Image (cartoon, rainbow, N blue to C red):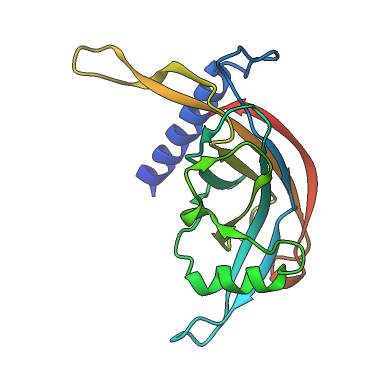
Amino acid sequence: MVRFKYWLFATILVIISISFAAPQPAVVPSQRHWTVNVKYEHPQQIEFQVRGRSEPLRFWYVIISLTNKTKQDVHFYPKCELMTNTLQVIPAGKETPESVFLAIKKRHRRKYRFLEPLERADHRILQGADNAKDIAIIWPDFDPKAKTIKIFIAGLSNETAVVNHPVEKDKDGKPIKVFLRKTLELTYEIQGDPVFRSDARLLYKGQRWIMR
């Protein structure tokens, strides 16, 4: 238990240190930097009965719509994570059967006819509204004790930065370099009784661009 508490404290310290040390995205991007236009649906939940399990599993998902107005075709290598205020970090797609995506696609088929799962999205976004992409980002249910969550979506821009790791060193005793990408951060407050998970509501608290 003591070792776990020490590890938790160290993790919090590293996250805070990197957050304070990280540069901010450019207010006026340079000509070599691009960022695609993004719209998003707020997180929704879905229950799905997985074969071999007596109880249905709960998943959360966000649908993002990406339009490339940068006047060039761009590469798309996303990294999406959900982080709770209890420091649970869940990568998108973790332990998510394909049948869950198919259920989401069916639910939204009228609005998003060509919805894609994040894991199979093309690694290029072509120019123009005719080539816009609608992508589902899915996570398994998170800690019911959490009071807030943050969703991080990287890959929407090619703006990057490098900072020194606040703790880890290389063999020569120099700080290890940490590679950061311009990332969209969405923040939500969780409302409702954790016991009645299906009634949980997420209150949108805003978005910002960060280097992460």
Q: Is residue 54 left or right of residue 66?
A: left
Furthest toward the left, the residue is 171
- Placement of 130 over or under 167, stated as above or below: below
The picture places residue 119, in percent across and down from the top left corner, at 47, 55
From the viewer's perspective, is 141 left or right of 27? left
Hey, which quadrant is residue 109 in on the image? bottom right
For the point 49% across and 70% down, which residue is it?
Answer: 98
Quarter of the rendering containing residue 201? bottom right
Q: Position of residue 79 (x, y in %)?
A: 49, 42
Question: What residue is rendered at 19% in x and 18% in y?
Answer: 171
Pick whichever, 144 or 98, lies toward us: 98
In this picture, is 200 found above or below 88? below
In the picture shown, does residue 160 fall above or below 157? above
Query: Residue 29's quadrant in the figure?
Result: top right
On the image, the x and y values in percent for residue 122 come to 49, 49
What residue do we see at 57% from left, 68% from top? Answer: 101
Instruction: Please say whether residue 119 is visible from this viewpoint.
Output: yes
Tag count in the figure?
0
Task: State the residue at coordinates (69%, 41%).
Answer: 186
* Residue 73: % across, % down: 55, 33
Answer yes or no: is residue 143 visible.
Answer: no
In this orientation, which residue lies closer to the viewer: 27 or 201? Answer: 27
